[in-house]
Image (cartoon, coloured by chain):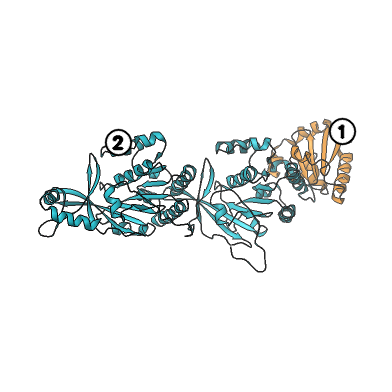
Amino acid sequence: MPRESVSRPVPKAPTGIQGLDEITGGGLPRGRPTLVCGGPGCGKTILGMEFLMNGARRYDEPGVFMSFEESVEDLTLNFASLGFDPRPLSARKKLSLDYVRIEPSEIYETGEYNLDGLFIRLEHAIDAIGAKRVVLDTIETLFSGLSDTRVLRAELRRLFNWLRTKGVTAIVTGERGNEGMTRHGLEEYLTDCVILLDHRVVEQNATRRLRVVKYRGSPHGANESPFFIDTSGISVLPITSLGLQHRVSNGRLSAGISGLDEMLGGKGYLRASSILVSGSAGTGKTSVAGYFVDAACRRGESALYFAFEESAAQIVRNLQSIGLDLEPWLRKGLLQIQAERATTSGLEGHLSGMHRLIEENRPRVVVVDPISNLISVGTSVEVRAMLARLIDFMKVKQTTALFSSLTVDENPEATDIGISSFMDTWLVLRNNEVNGERNRTLNVLKSRGMAHSNQVREFVLTRDGLKLVDMVRDRHGRVAFGSRRAARSASTTGNGARRRSNGR
Amino acid sequence: MTGKSKRRPRAPRQQNGDAEFFELRLYIAGQTSRSLAALTNLKRICEEHLQGRYRIEVIDLLQHPQLARGDQILALPTLVRKLPEPIRKLVGDLSDTERALVGLDLRPLRPAKA
């Protein structure tokens, strides 16, 4: 963090919300109110509640949730349904829920007043549990019950100042307004930190976005970041990269295919690298992925396989047909296959889900098969950002990742150029139709940090497994495939042996 | 607010109102001039309109902060009419006698609106 000569760095209170602390460089301004605004249903209340729950659970900072919209019972039920039940924390006096009900039809204004009642009530709640965090959700509801906006504005200003002197880290939520950031211009009084939430539908997929509009005295990510709400709460996925400071590994790991290890400088993939396997339909991408996973499990390493095209059972059955049995690894718990249609959730949903599973299971190797299916979910700028993010994340975790990519034409090099720059190793699979046969080939287009083979090899899927076979030239100097190659290499062993020694 | 008062059948209500007992609770915060003004105004209104059939309870929230929750008190001073039902809340120091009477349901709105 750049150090300012005039001001000390702003102390921060971590939210414990995945990604948000990263964008804000450590959390919300400690001891100050933060404005969180957005339209209805954009996640303001959940953000506030998670901030308090994490405060109480992880940072030993009790919190007060003052709701102006939902009763304590409704709040409790809503949060319990989202996977965090506030009741145990309430019972331990780590969390206090209060519902301030405003019934405009009951209220008659008969003269001068202030909001001391609210102050006293809030202070009482704070002092009762020694709260360090406060959420006011949504305080603008006051404007519906009390008509004297001049008094209300003065009182809100006083309230926010009072929160500062009280030294609590607060979230004040506000409804998105037509003109200003909030309907009643709360941003005028809450200038320490402003976070904007947005919920919109892009090509039938609901996407949520979060942006830190303002953070006084602190650098912060200014981009819109996708975020996602599921049973574990909110995950923010900063578009910005994690940076390239992760440590690099010189360790190597086998691809599980002997010929392929040889092509990769004789030792296989680099540990914690990212590998792209592209090819059109039926070129054997899943087989390459399967062998990669199998090799990991044989070494006793855990593997996580994200399947966006086939079910777990389908993958296992299909690989069995080429002599690869993943069943024992699944039974042992070394391998986990997470199969899901790419369209079942938004892009953020997938990324967040993958993130979480990787975080929880800490696999040493990960397969995403195929990454191209996610493109049907998001636009490709987003996919690239998301991919960069996921790759950085895995590098930090020292996880080796293999991504397959289904390309539509026979020129995968053009199709995947956009994502290939994130990849350390790029394998290209092709179908070659020659002489009435369809044969597969594999070549290493690039592999950073190693001397790799420049050969195209024939890639044979047999019932006994996958084999990489040297290409053989016929007497006209043309590459021979399939049965021609077999016949050729049988007759001209000398030529074949020479070629092979070059490749190794 | 105007719309609601108009819908209510005024005449029979007034007759009932004459016999009803008023239980009033005044919330204040400390002995400020505004608190004192509210109490003075309240006593005057009660003596003029509810002689012998009212009771005033004054709650100082500085001393009993926990009581703010029960009656959903935000603004101070607030007068809560506990009885007769329904509950009503009069926010402010009761210096606007006309509005206070409307709030307590002791007077119909201006004849022009009746």
- The numbered mark at residue A131 is none
Q: Nearer the viewer, mark 1 or mark 2?
A: 2
x, y (%) of residue A57?
63, 42
Mark 1 — on which chain does it sit?
Answer: B
Q: Which element carries disc 2, helix, strand or loop?
A: helix
Residue bearing mark 1: B53
x, y (%) of residue B55?
86, 35
Give whichever of A364, B17 is nearer the camera: A364
Q: Between marks 1 and 2, how big is the CA–CA gap?
A: 87 Å
Q: Which quadrant of the figure contains the N terminus of chain A? A: bottom right
Please state if A117 lies on the left or on the right of A496 as rendered: right
Mark 2 — on which chain does it sit?
Answer: A
- The numbered mark at residue A317 is 2
Q: Which element carries disc 1, helix, strand or loop?
A: loop
Look at chain A in the picture and name its colour.
cyan
Please state if A422 lies on the left or on the right of A20 as rendered: left
x, y (%) of residue A459?
23, 49
Residue type, mark 1 in image: Arg
x, y (%) of residue A357?
46, 43
Give whichever of A363, A254 is nearer the camera: A254
Residue type, mark 2 in image: Arg
Q: Residues within 10 Å of mark 1 (few under 14, many from 20)?
A: some
Q: Residues within 10 Å of mark 2 (few under 14, many from 20)?
A: some
Please state if A306 lies on the left or on the right of A76 as rendered: left
Q: Which quadrant of the figure contains the C terminus of chain A? A: bottom left
Instruction: Mark 1 vs mark 2: tell me if same chain.
Output: no
Quarter of the rendering containing residue B46: top right
Is disc 1 in contact with disc 2, using a CB cutoff of under 8 Å?
Answer: no
Is residue A151 visible to us here?
Answer: no
- Number of numbered discs visible in the structure rendering: 2
Is residue A304 visible to us here?
Answer: yes
Look at chain B in the picture and name its colour.
orange
